[in-house]
Image (spheres, rainbow, N blue to C red):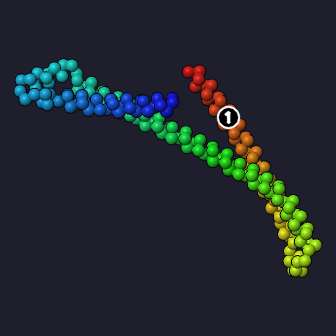
């Protein structure tokens, strides 16, 4: 159901609620006039026409429509929340992919800088740490690369599953 249609239904139910309030006030014969005989005749007429029952059923129908609209509104909010969650996931995975590309482009620079530091004029105790730092950088870059590839793969699987599911549900709903 399009959101504009839902807004139209909400306006109609609000109008029905307002009209029901008018009907309830009109269903009290003592408000019509002050003469006892006219109030008594109005009560008898309303009882014969089952006006109290009709008003009660109308109240129940309007309450049911209000409940239905509230439920549909909650479904819209849940759908919006799900779409925002999907967007957050996509952005997170894109950020992971960007991180992977940064790691791939900077690891070679890291290796070149470490090689230059080994040959350059650096204090002796710092030179002893450089191979360990290079090894740590290699290990970290390997783990980060594998993790980023895993996240990108997960995103591709997630997007394909959601695309298939949305396509399948659209076909079901368009047939009706």
> Would you say 135 lies left or right of 46 here?
right
How far across and down, in percent of the image, does residue 108 sit? 87, 59
What residue is rendered at 8% in x and 23% in y?
38
Residue extending farthest right: 119
Seen from the viewer's position, the closer of residues 152 and 43 is 152
How far across and down, in percent of the image, does residue 71 sit? 45, 36
Q: Is residue 88 at least partly visible in the picture?
A: yes
Q: Is residue 60 at least partly visible in the picture?
A: no
Which residue bears the numbered disc 1?
163
Vertically, is 158 above or below 8? below
Vertically, is 63 above or below 152? above
Q: Quadrant of the C terminus?
A: top right
Seen from the viewer's position, the closer of residues 71 and 18 is 18
Please tell me how many numbered marks the rendered image carries: 1
How far across and down, in percent of the image, does residue 35 sit? 5, 27
What residue is rendered at 13% in x and 28% in y?
32
Vertically, is 78 above or below 92? above
What residue is rendered at 66% in x and 37% in y?
162
Q: Residues within 10 Å of mark 1 (few under 14, many from 20)?
A: few
The picture quadrant where one finds residue 12 is top left
> Would you say 110 lies left or right of 161 here?
right
What residue is rendered at 88% in x and 63% in y?
111
How far across and down, in percent of the image, does residue 54 sit? 27, 24
> Would you say 127 lies left or right of 86 here?
right
The picture quadrant where one finds residue 11 is top left
**Mark 1: which secondary structure?**
helix
């Amino acid at each position: 159901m399009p959101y504009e249609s839902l807004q139209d239904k909400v306006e109609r139910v609000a109008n029905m609620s307002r009209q029901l309030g008018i009907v309830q006030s009109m269903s009290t014969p003592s408000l019509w006039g002050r003469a006892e005989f006219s109030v008594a005749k109005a009560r008898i007429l309303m009882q014969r026409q089952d006006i109290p029952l009709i008003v009660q059923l109308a109240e129940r129908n309007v309450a049911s429509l209000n409940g239905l609209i509230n439920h549909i509104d909650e479904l819209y909010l849940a759908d919006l929340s799900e779409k925002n969650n999907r967007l957050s996931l996509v952005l997170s995975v894109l950020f992971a992919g960007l991180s992977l590309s940064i790691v791939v482009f900077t690891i070679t620079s890291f290796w070149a800088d470490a090689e230059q530091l080994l040959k350059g004029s650096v204090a002796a105790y710092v030179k002893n740490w450089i191979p360990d730092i290079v090894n740590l950088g290699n290990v970290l870059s390997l783990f980060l690369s594998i993790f980023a590839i895993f996240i990108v793969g997960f995103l591709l699987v997630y997007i394909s599953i959601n695309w298939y599911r949305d396509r399948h549900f659209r076909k079901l709903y368009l047939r009706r």
